[in-house]
Image: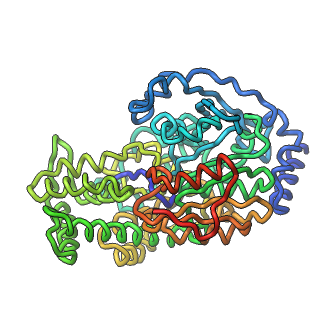
Amino acid sequence: MGVGGARCVRRRRTPAAVAALVALLGTFAGTPGAAAVDDPDLTSFYQQTLAWEPCGEDLQNGAQSGGAGQPAGFRKRLECARLEVPRDYGDPGRSTMQVQLIRLKATGPGKRIGSLVLNPGGPGASGVNYLIDSGSAFTRLGQRYDIVSFDPRGTGHTEPVSCGSKLAPPPGTGADSLAAKEKRINEACGRYSGGLLKWVGTPDVARDMDVLRAAVRDDKLNYLGFSYGTKLGAVYAHEFPRKVGRMVLDSVEDPTKNAWQTALSQARGFQRALDEFSAGCVRVAGCPLGTDKGKAEEQLRRWYQELNDRPMKVNGETVDETTYVYALREALYSRSVWPTLRTALEQLRRGDGSGILRLSDAGGSSAAHVDGVPTRPVGRDELPPQDQLALRAISCRDTSERYGEDDFPRAERELTQASPLFGPDIAPTLLDCHDWPVAGDDSSREVAAPDAPPLLLVATTNDPATPYEGAFNMARALDNSSVVLTFHGEGHAAYTTGDPCVHQHVDGFLLNGTLPKPRTSCG
């Protein structure tokens, strides 16, 4: 999902035949890992040797921080390589693609366990950028693991989805409808990336991860995935149950919900988090929302309407109701940002929108926030940024749902009822796959893995992007005695909060194989 914390675009988804059959039958049998490794057409992929070398400046400079703020010598420790994988696993000899990898080698002390593969979320996030920006968050794990991440197909430096540089203007002189605008975006994606779009779905990325597992010479995949990365990890467990090592899924997507249900769940989740922020703010001296929770909620809605009616200009940039909603949402991903949001709202109260603009821009390429909560692009001829195009391509490949103009009134009504502030901004995302150029299917929601060892699922009670109950639905769907660790708190991606209790249990499992007892909680 696209559920989780996606970076949002403002405003407005023969031998080869025998090999394919073997892989398909392996999937139905629940043991495709063995079929993939034994398939002679895939042997060269599974036996490849990676050529690790220092990462180029172009890769490091493409990240949000370029490694700034990381420990001394951090950038010099980064190594990069390319992993060759089939474009189409059903016909592996026809065409290949090169997956961009990055790693931090284990530092010791202690015996090296192997590689720990990270996925930061999305879909659409660059795992390469994430490790460059956030590698120090995994220092303890990095003593005994090589920390490895990658740009999934269609993202970052791995054949990124392209839809051109600018949209062709709509027919005639007037503005087109929202659905027509989405159709123009999707037609452009088909023109520029039509040969790629069929092959960017989550099951294909899961197969790439198994080739990666073999290429780093690990018998089992050890994995830590956040938000959309939990879906990817669960699909891997479904496809390769006997290749699962120690796997942690943090901020868990709900496999029982379709795109419409997910959008509703996210609208309610962000509204819940905003209500918690308001309740806390009014108890603090000088809260810009006042001292009454009911009036605080009215004030938040009043600012939304005022910015809709009379947008502000800050250094030549427009601060409108969409900027405002995105700033709120950005702050709700982590409780640590709440003081910044209070300051921004105090500035807004005085007629200064600069704090709101900075908050809105803060998630520009934050991988942890690329989790299926896009908004609409600005301007009738503008395209979403590349991470959002990748999100759209992967999400549309991962679902059979195709909503159009006739569905939008109901979507807007239901989502606005769920959240008067966030609902109207999330509703248009249900049109992302309107006339998408390739068909989608729902196979990525199939996560049953009864033959896999138990996974550790981490769930935050007031996670706005991947609501708490999703972890329990995932555990039931996996059907392999996976354990849910509860973090009583706010925000998204509990491990990245630095909570010592969460770290103790996650690190204990990944380093020692010790699962917490059922119903264990932190926070």
Residue 185 visible in the displayed image? no
Residue 251, image x, y percentages: 52, 59
- Image quarter of the C terminus: bottom left
The number of numbered discs placed on residues in the rendered structure image is 0
* Whether residue 486 is visible: yes
Q: Provide residue 109's location: percent of width, then percent of height.
A: 63, 32
On the image, the x and y values in percent for residue 365 come to 41, 42
Of residues 38 and 22, the one drawn nearer to the viewer in this rendering? 38
Q: Is residue 183 left or right of residue 108?
A: left
Q: Quadrant of residue 216?
A: top right
- Residue name at image x 42 percent, y 67 percent: 462
Hey, which quadrant is residue 285 in on the image? bottom left
Q: Residue furthest front?
A: 109
> Residue 399 in the image: x percent, y percent?
60, 62
Residue 232 lies left or right of residue 27; in this view the side is left
229 vs 40, left or right, is: left
